[in-house]
Image: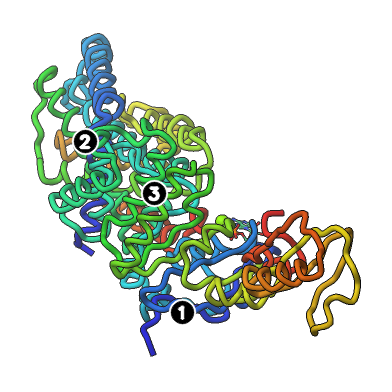
């Protein structure tokens, strides 16, 4: 059995009468790039805040690399670097000293902290701003600083709560690349998102969370396969019935052939030849690939970003 | 508990008020200087002396205490309030620091500022009015205990309060009246019996009295009582503050 970075069992959380988490189970192997995907209010932030100790759970337990987040909180917390959903900085200091203090809270000497801060500021293209206050940074810079801060004590796991919400495309791609590199270098990453594209692009495993519960989990590829809604659509002229006598699954609606297919590209070749043989002219071809969006839709009957 | 994360929090708290010295340390020096000059010089010549102490000297222990209280209380309460507004408190709550370390760390920041402002006022009094301290260790002990009690109260108000007004309420409606009524500027022996008896339930009275004993060697009532009373406040307020941090009262969900 490989080591687990996160082990959550039957986690519950009530905020008054709102049940935010409802018996959530989750296991994240060490070294994984793990996505927690779900709509707003699904319980992503609550789950993360219980891992870091910011929210008191109502039931169940959570462990970080085997350390219970409550009874062994000191060891558990040292192993996590968190980039929270909402930006938060200590505005009293310039960003270099702010980072050095952040390192200090995790046991780093101030001198080592400053060296590490310089290294990270450089890596995130913020060196020029090191004497500035976080208040004086642009939105994108603040995001980068937020992630640099989570890395100060070089934790084996980073948790990012919607790191690219409201971020422009350029920065998003930069962050994606950065996180991929971090993962390659051995860091376990837990990322929450309600962007399908992000989960599909980055994560080796995705857990879909809804109403405080994990409703499905797997690699993006297997999940998509399971939802089975990739399809090929071919608009044709002068269609004739009875030309397809194989046992092929399709329907003909509005001058268009709708063909469910796991690999629509492959299917397309067969169909083009068949239609040519029968002198049926093709007006338009459209491939619709199933995505995690479809997975979510199929599981819940709702769309993810409603 | 004396570990690096804990020391970092103290370093942070001290840096904060030193960086803001124009709002933190300087005002207490100015207002005390004014009290010494205006009250001491002008009223002093009319009042003469109390218990054999020149009036200008008699008021100094109360001024020292007033400043220590305000600075200690302001430091922890405003630092925590600000941390809540900026969400920076969350960054601290997820570090390996526990509730005890967080609350004591914030308290020590306030104690250092309270003691520093007390020492600044004493130095100023020495410059302006040539005052000499009778018992330095006891003065420091009093300063530390009083600053500690009010810094701990500041932690409680900082966590509990929702707005800056909540912090000011304590300063304006509780500390100010109680210090003035506690005999900063007079001896309660000068009051009619009724008001004298009322003064005895004012903890600030006992603290001022103890401070006056340690600095000038005179007192209205047993001087060790001030140590006991401050000590009790220290224990009660520190316990509540630590419990609040540990349970995450109002700061964790
Ligand atoms: N502090 C809170 N008080 C009351 N309800 C809350 C609080 N935080 C979150 N909730 C509720 O808990 C549920 C889960 O929220 P959250 O974990 O923030 O979801 P997500 O991060 O997936 O958007 C939502 O219904 C939300 O309204
Ligand atoms: Mg959230």
Asked whether the beta carbons under mark 3 and mark 2 sit within 8 Å of each other, the answer is no
> Nearest the camera: A64 or B111?
A64
Which of pointers 2 and 1 indicates the residue nearer the eye?
Answer: 1
x 34%, y 26%: residue: B190
Q: Is mark 2 within 8 Å of ligand 1?
A: no
Query: Is residue B133 or residue A246 the one in the foreground?
Result: A246
Q: From mark 2 to mark 1, how far is it between C-alphas?
A: 60 Å
Decide: few, some or many residues near mark 1? Use Cα within 10 Å; few <14, some 14-19, many ≥20.
many
In the image shown, does A64 or A282 lie closer to the viewer? A282
Task: Name the residue: 37% across, 77% down.
Answer: A30
The dot on residue A7 is: 1
Compared with A263, A109 (above or below) is: above
Q: x, y percentage for residue B96?
A: 32, 64
- Chain of the residue under the numbered disc 2 shown in the image: B
Q: Position of residue B199 (x, y in %)?
A: 41, 37
- Tell me, yes or no, whether the two marked residues, 1 and 3, touch with CB atoms within 8 Å: no
- The chain that hosts pointer 3 is A
- For label 3, the crowd category at 10 Å Cα-Cα, with few meaning under 14, some 14 to 19 and many 20 or more, is few
Horizontal side, residue A164 vs residue B56: left or right = right
Above or below residue A38? Residue A61 is below
Is residue A237 found left or right of B84 in the rendered image? right
In the structure shown, which secondary structural element does the residue marked by tag 3 occupy? helix
Image quadrant in which the C terminus of chain B is located: bottom right
Q: Nearer the viewer, mark 3 or mark 2?
A: 3
**Residue at numbered disc 3:** A174
Residue occupied by mark 2: B212
């Amino acid at each position: 059995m490989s080591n687990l970075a996160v082990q959550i069992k039957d986690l519950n959380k009530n905020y008054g009468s709102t049940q935010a988490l409802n018996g959530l189970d989750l296991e994240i192997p060490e070294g994984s790039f793990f996505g927690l995907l779900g709509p707003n209010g699904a319980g992503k932030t609550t789950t993360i805040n219980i891992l870091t100790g910011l929210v008191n759970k109502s039931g169940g337990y959570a462990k970080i690399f085997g350390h219970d987040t409550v009874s062994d909180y000191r060891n558990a917390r040292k192993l996590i670097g968190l980039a929270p959903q909402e930006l938060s900085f200590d505005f009293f200091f310039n960003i270099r000293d702010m980072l050095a203090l952040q390192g200090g809270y995790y046991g780093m000497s101030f001198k080592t902290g400053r060296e590490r801060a310089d290294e990270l500021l450089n890596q995130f293209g913020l060196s020029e701003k090191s004497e500035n206050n976080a208040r004086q940074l642009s939105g994108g810079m603040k995001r980068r600083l937020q992630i640099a801060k989570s890395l100060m004590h070089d934790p084996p796991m980073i948790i990012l709560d919607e790191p690219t919400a409201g971020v422009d495309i350029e920065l998003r791609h930069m962050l994606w690349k950065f996180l991929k590199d971090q993962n390659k270098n051995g860091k376990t990453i837990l990322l929450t998102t309600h962007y399908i594209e992000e989960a599909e692009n980055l994560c080796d495993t995705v857990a879909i969370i809804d109403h405080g519960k994990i409703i499905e989990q797997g690699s993006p590829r297997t999940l998509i396969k399971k939802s089975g809604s990739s399809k090929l659509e071919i608009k044709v002229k002068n269609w004739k019935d009875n030309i397809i006598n194989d046992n092929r699954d399709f329907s003909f609606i509005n001058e268009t052939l709708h063909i469910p297919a796991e690999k629509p590209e492959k299917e397309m070749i067969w169909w083009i030849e068949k239609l040519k043989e029968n002198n049926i002219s093709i007006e338009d071809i459209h491939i619709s690939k199933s995505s995690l969006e479809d997975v979510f839709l199929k599981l819940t009957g709702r769309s993810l970003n409603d | 508990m004396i570990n690096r994360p804990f020391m970092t929090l103290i370093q942070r708290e001290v840096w904060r008020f030193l960086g803001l010295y124009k709002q933190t340390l300087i005002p207490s020096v100015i207002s005390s200087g004014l009290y010494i000059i205006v009250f001491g010089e002008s009223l002093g010549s009319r009042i003469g002396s109390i218990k054999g102490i020149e009036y200008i000297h008699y008021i100094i222990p109360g001024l020292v205490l007033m400043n220590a209280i305000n600075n200690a209380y302001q430091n922890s309460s405003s630092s925590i309030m600000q941390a809540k507004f900026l969400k920076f408190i969350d960054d601290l709550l997820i570090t390996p620091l526990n509730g005890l370390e967080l609350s004591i760390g914030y308290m020590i920041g306030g104690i250092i500022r309270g003691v520093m402002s007390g020492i600044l006022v004493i130095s100023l009094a020495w410059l302006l009015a040539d005052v000499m301290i009778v018992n330095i260790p006891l003065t420091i002990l009093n300063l530390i205990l009083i600053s500690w009690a009010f810094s701990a109260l500041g932690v409680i108000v900082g966590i509990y309060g929702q707005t800056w007004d909540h912090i000011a309420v304590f300063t304006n409606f509780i500390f100010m009246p109680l210090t003035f009524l506690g005999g900063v500027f007079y001896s309660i022996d000068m009051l009619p019996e009724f008001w004298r008896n009322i003064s005895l339930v004012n903890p600030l009275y006992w603290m001022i009295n103890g401070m006056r004993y340690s600095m000038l060697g005179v007192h209205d009532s047993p001087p060790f009582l001030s140590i006991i009373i401050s000590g009790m406040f220290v224990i009660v307020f520190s316990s509540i503050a630590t419990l609040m941090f540990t349970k995450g009262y109002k700061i964790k969900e």
